Image: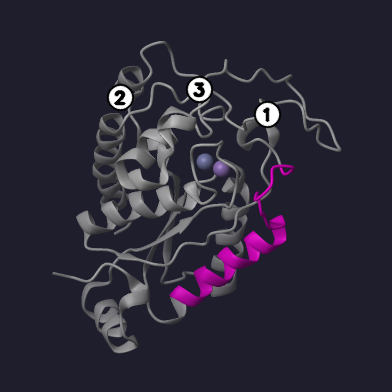
Amino acid sequence: MNALRMDRLSWMDYAARIQRDQPAIFLPVGALEQHGPHLPLGTDGLLAAAVAADTARLVGGLLAPTLSYGYKSQPKCGGGQHFSGTTSVDAATLIGSVRDAVREFARHGATRLVVVNGHYENQWFLIEGIDLGLRDLGPQPALQVMRLEYWDFLTAATLADVFPDGFPGFALEHAAVIETSMMLHYHPSLVRTDLIPDEPPADFPPYDRYPTPKDWGPPSGVLSSAKGASAEKGRRMAHELAQRMAAAVARALR
Ligand code: ZN
Ligand code: MN
């Protein structure tokens, strides 16, 4: 059995794994962000890490520690920065962290890095960090990088099952059915099902305004109801995600 977590390996074991297996290294990226009254602040990173761990197991990969601070929460997909505990970093900080990770993993011989994003707002800054990191490595870098938002691996058939009344879209899926179900599957002790609010989905105008209004979304911070969440839905989604992400890693990275 290959060990899964990089931070539990000695440097010698890590060096041997890199030499022997050229494992794909999974780097989860999350956020510290309000997730309503029923989910913890670290939900995005916890879910990215859980899905990355399941996928890494399937492909014989290694799981690196999570980058746990994300880009600033936006009202239309995360509630906004005004919620207590939403503790974010500037874009330059996130870009720099990912750029450093790309360079550092490459420096000790990793050839495959999979950046697993769990926080909607991170996306373009991860892309920039990867781009700058690869530029640092020079032409024909030995490291290949794959980047993904885990929710994109859910099939339309699964979304139809999970949302019998219609899928509200991933932006409004904040602290809602997908995240709550997945947390009930992976971390049931961290979910307060008794506190799940029952509100209509948030309705936003097709523009942004600055300074960001604090009253655009529901005061609970939940952008569409999590009432339909269940551990069984979470189990099905988690299984599908790991299977399909593993297949994609095998396909995309030599
Ligand atoms: Zn989230
Ligand atoms: Mn988020």
Q: Residue 109: image x %, image y %?
A: 38, 79
Which one is closest to the eye, mark 3 or mark 2? 3
Q: Is residue 67 magenta?
A: no
Q: Is residue 198 above or below residue 61?
A: above
Which one is closest to the eye, mark 3 or mark 1? 1
Q: Secondary structure at mark 2?
A: helix
Q: Is residue 82 above or below residue 158?
A: below
> Residue 138: in sight, yes or no?
no
Alpha carbon separation for disc pair 3 and 1: 13 Å
Looking at the image, tell me whether mark 1 or mark 2 is earlier in sequence order.
2
Q: Nearer the viewer, residue 67 or 33?
A: 33
Q: Is residue 99 magenta?
A: yes
- The amino acid marked with disc number 2 is Thr
Alpha carbon separation for disc pair 3 and 2: 18 Å
10 Å neighbourhood of mark 2: few (<14), some, or many (≥20)?
few
Residue reaching furthest right?
211
Q: Residue 113: image x %, image y %?
A: 40, 63
- Magenta stretch bounds: 81-105
**In the picture, residue 15 is in which quadrant?**
bottom left
For the C terminus, the quadrant is: bottom left
- The amino acid marked with disc number 1 is Pro
Residue of label 1:
219
Residue of label 3:
225
Residue of label 2:
158
Q: Residue at x 74, y 42 (%)?
A: 82
Q: Secondary structure at mark 1?
A: loop
Which one is closest to the eye, mark 1 or mark 2? 1
